[in-house]
Amino acid sequence: MISLIPRPSCSIARCKRYYTTPPGRPAGTRKAGSPRPLLGRYPEVFPVELARVQSGRTVNLRDYESQVKLKRLSFDLKTHDGKVLPADGPNFLGPNGCSLREPFSPTFQEVVRNFRGTNIVVYVIPEGTPVPKTLTLLHEHSDHFSLQCAQPMSLPELNKEITDFLVKSARAITKEEFGEEYPYEI
């Protein structure tokens, strides 16, 4: 069959530069990119409506070390000497809290549709909701926000703070109710 669309030429030699390690750097390593600036810090109120999907009503954030032991790649935060530390500085340096996204964002719509498990709960936090003094909200990148500790605390303390906040200040709906209230159209 003859193709009417010209194909770009790409020899192994031309592509090789994308797949090889530069001299002086060990194989399998890459240079870390420069940190991305945070898009916003909101210590007082939620600037937009945000949502979170999870199994059950209790927040159970995953720390890096526990996930590594389970041979899992995804995590929510890292602990330091048994404490979760506030994200300081102007840059996003990695996961550090409870993920939130706008309900109509394509990413969140996909996450909810693909979420599996029992007891699925979608928490929806209205715009203008006050942020508790023990927590802070960061707009980390793209459509991703993170509800984090405002002061050092243990992971169980952070899970309790966020759970208490969501139970008090957010609407809890099912995955099906979310699909009805926030329909996604292409």
Image (cartoon, rainbow, N blue to C red):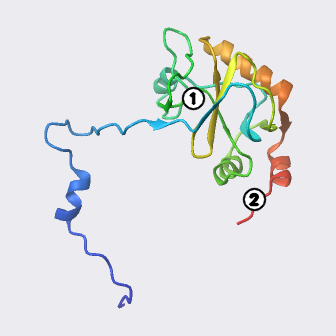
**Within-10-Å neighbours for mark 1: few <14, some 14–19, many 20+:** some
Secondary structure at numbered mark 1: loop
**Within-10-Å neighbours for mark 2: few <14, some 14–19, many 20+:** few
Q: Residue at x 85, y 35 (%)?
A: 171
Question: Which of 138 and 122 lies nearest the eye of the viewer?
Answer: 138
Question: Which of 159 and 169 lies nearest the eye of the viewer?
Answer: 169
Q: Is residue 137 above or below residue 111?
A: above
**Amino acid type, callout 2:** Tyr
Q: Position of residue 107 (x, y in %)?
A: 63, 50
Disc 1 designates what residue? 76
Question: Which of 37 and 59 lies nearest the eye of the viewer?
Answer: 37
Residue furthest to the left in view is 23
Q: Residue at x 83, y 49 (%)?
A: 176
Q: Residue 157: which quarter of the image?
A: top right
Relative horizontal placement of residue 83, taking residue 110 as reference (left or right): left
Q: Is residue 51 above or below residue 69?
A: below
Relative horizontal placement of residue 158, taking residue 2 as reference (left or right): right
Secondary structure at numbered mark 2: loop
Q: Position of residue 116 (x, y in %)?
A: 69, 43
Labels 1 and 2: the sequence-earlier one: 1
Q: Position of residue 162 (x, y in %)?
A: 73, 22
Disc 2 designates what residue? 184
Q: Is residue 106 above or below residue 155?
A: below
Q: Residue at x 20, y 35 (%)?
A: 26
Q: Residue 172: which quarter of the image?
A: top right
Relative horizontal placement of residue 116, taking residue 166 as reference (left or right): left
**Amino acid type, callout 1:** Asp
Question: Which of 113 and 90 lies nearest the eye of the viewer?
Answer: 90
Q: Is residue 8 above or below residue 97?
A: below
Where is the N terminus found, in terms of image quarters? bottom left
